[in-house]
Image: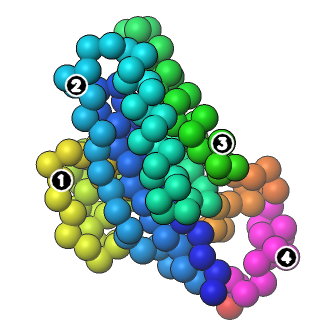
Amino acid sequence: MDKKTIIGIDPGTNLLGFGVVDVVAGKPQYVDMGVLDLRKEPDAYTKLRQIYDTVSEVCRSYHATEMALESPFYGKNAQVILKLGRAQGAAMIAALEFGIPVTEYAPREAKQAITGNGAASKEQVCMMLEKTLGVRLEAHHLDATDALAIALCHHYATSGPLSAVRKGGGSWEKFIQTHPDRVK
């Protein structure tokens, strides 16, 4: 049976979300999601260590084969971008130590992949994930559903008709050659 396990990460230094999706025979299945709450930890370096440890444990527990990571969006505050980049780096290193390839996606790209609208709200993303994966999600921390959306976005980006374009393969002809079973 063809199976891959994708871990999605919504990095943050206060709340870090993770989502896990198994893809079996090309079909995504919900596995788990959660939030690492770091708001009570005053030391920035201890937060990074906890991010590394938690993401390492998620990778180990679910036998991840791929990781999708939300890239920091560009805002007005450079300090926020710097902190998000550090959190993202801690998560990346955890995956890379297990030999898990990492791919980044912009928040708008994930929202577009899940809802068809790059400006969708977190609540809209959660609702579409429920419908797509056939599960009821507790949205008390939407960082976890964002991470799940990143994982599902990665699945779509690497297995759909546009995957050849994203990988630099570049043409429908190449896609058809690579995936003859997908053309009817």
Residue 31 belongs to the span the image colors magenta? no
Looking at the image, which is closer to me, 30 or 119? 30
Disc 2 to disc 3, C-alpha distance: 26 Å
Disc 1 to disc 2, C-alpha distance: 18 Å
Q: Secondary structure at mark 3?
A: helix
Q: Which residue has dot 2 on it?
A: 39
- Label annotation for residue 97: 3
Q: How many marks?
A: 4
Disc 1 or disc 2, which is closer to the eye? Answer: 2
Relative side of 53 to 30, left or right: right
Q: Quarter-wise, where is residue 45 in the image? A: top left
Disc 2 and disc 3 in contact, CB within 8 angstroms: no
Disc 4 to disc 3, C-alpha distance: 34 Å
Binning the other alpha carbons within 10 Å of mark 1 as few (below 14), some (14 to 19) or many (20 upward) gives few
Earlier residue among tags 4 and 3: 3
Earlier residue among tags 1 and 4: 1
Q: Which residue has dot 4 on it?
A: 177
Q: Which residue has dot 1 on it?
A: 139
Binning the other alpha carbons within 10 Å of mark 3 as few (below 14), some (14 to 19) or many (20 upward) gives few
Is residue 120 visible in the rendered image? The answer is no
Dot 3 amino acid type: Glu
Is residue 142 visible in the rendered image? The answer is yes
Question: Is 132 situated above or below 44?
Answer: below
Relative side of 60 to 140, left or right: right
Q: Position of residue 11 (x, y in %)?
A: 41, 34
Q: Position of residue 73 (x, y in %)?
A: 45, 27
Disc 2 or disc 3, which is closer to the eye? Answer: 3
Q: Position of residue 33 (x, y in %)?
A: 33, 56
Dot 2 amino acid type: Arg
Disc 4 to disc 2, C-alpha distance: 50 Å
- Tell me which residue sits at (37%, 15%) in the image: 44
